[in-house]
Image (spheres, rainbow, N blue to C red):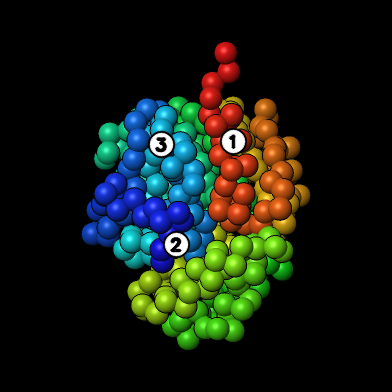
Amino acid sequence: MRILVNNQDFASHRKQFTFDNQTLSYIDIGQGPVLLFGHAYLWDAQMWAPQIIELSQQYRCIVPDLWGHGLSSTMPENCRNLRDISSQMLTFMDAIGIDTFSIIGSSVGAMWGAEMALAAPERVQRLVMLNSFIGYEPEITRDKFNAMLNVIKTEQCVSAKIRQAIVPLFFAQQAKPELVEHFNNTLDSIDNEPKIDTICRLGNMIFGRRDTTEEAEALSLPCLIMAGAQDKIRSVLESYLMQDVIRGSEFVQIPDAGHISTLEQADFINQRLSQFLTPSE
């Protein structure tokens, strides 16, 4: 599940961490304050390529492939929800000797990132949430996506019919054809039963996640919330709702962007991230 951007695959910066006999693949590049990235569902670390290239000049970028995605192994059996994933990520950061860090998450990456910020507020310095929502999944979308997952699990592949329904959800109306083609081909290549199982399990975790909005009221760290103006999966309204509950948070709408805004509007994202991550005088 690999989507190359600007021919950057970061192979020389790839490392592995073993957790419960499963291998987590991650990119470790740059020096300085640490940034932990969380990618979107059905994507991988490569969706952050433009940001890694830019930010690794000043920061140490740690960019894992989530279980069943990219080069990582399937999900450990005892992983049952997004809190478990956040706990695993804290263990991972301990193992590589990182105490404090900032989190930059997109979609599910922001969901487990928020769980980390709640679980270890003394360690997470800043939080960025792109195209995400930490409340309950609305019933209508939960049922819609779970029905798709049931078909994928039954067929043991992401069929052309399912791809036709899924792929457009991730992009703005005037999507870059090469991104659409890459994503479609990536989904088409998933035909490994263990990975299909992991992807479906993770999807059920995402769409059945707990509501953390009330707990998020206690967050006091700097928080940047960003949303693609044309995101079909997570509405701009949901980002406004998160801004309302996280005091002092900043909201930015990303023009002409869908769910994968890091690739659709890379320069805009890079500029906003650089501004947010730079401490004020």
Mark 3 packing: few (<14 Cα in 10 Å), some, or many (20+)?
some
Q: Residue furthest top?
A: 281
User: Which residue, given by chain and number where applicable, does mark 3 sit on?
Assistant: 56
| Position of residue 101 measured from the top left corner of the image (x, y, whole percent) | 42, 32
- First in sequence: mark 1 or mark 2? 2
Question: Which quarter of the figure is the N terminus placed in?
Answer: bottom left
Q: Relative to the observer, which residue lies in front, 24 or 188? A: 188
User: Which residue, given by chain and number where applicable, does mark 2 sit on?
Assistant: 3
As drawn, 180 above or below 222: below
As drawn, 251 above or below 3: above
Indicate the secondary structure of the residue bearing disc 1: helix
Q: What residue type is labelled 3?
A: Ser
Disc 3 versus disc 2: distance between alpha carbons?
Answer: 19 Å
Q: Relative to the observer, which residue lies in front, 142 or 56? A: 56
Disc 1 versus disc 3: distance between alpha carbons?
Answer: 14 Å
Q: Which amino acid does label 1 sit on?
A: Gln
- First in sequence: mark 3 or mark 2? 2
- Residue at the spot x=66%, y=73% of the render? 144
Disc 1 versus disc 2: distance between alpha carbons?
Answer: 22 Å
| Position of residue 17 measured from the top left corner of the image (x, y, whole percent) | 26, 50
| Position of residue 159 measured from the top left corner of the image (x, y, whole percent) | 52, 83
User: Which residue, given by chain and number where applicable, does mark 1 sit on?
Assistant: 271
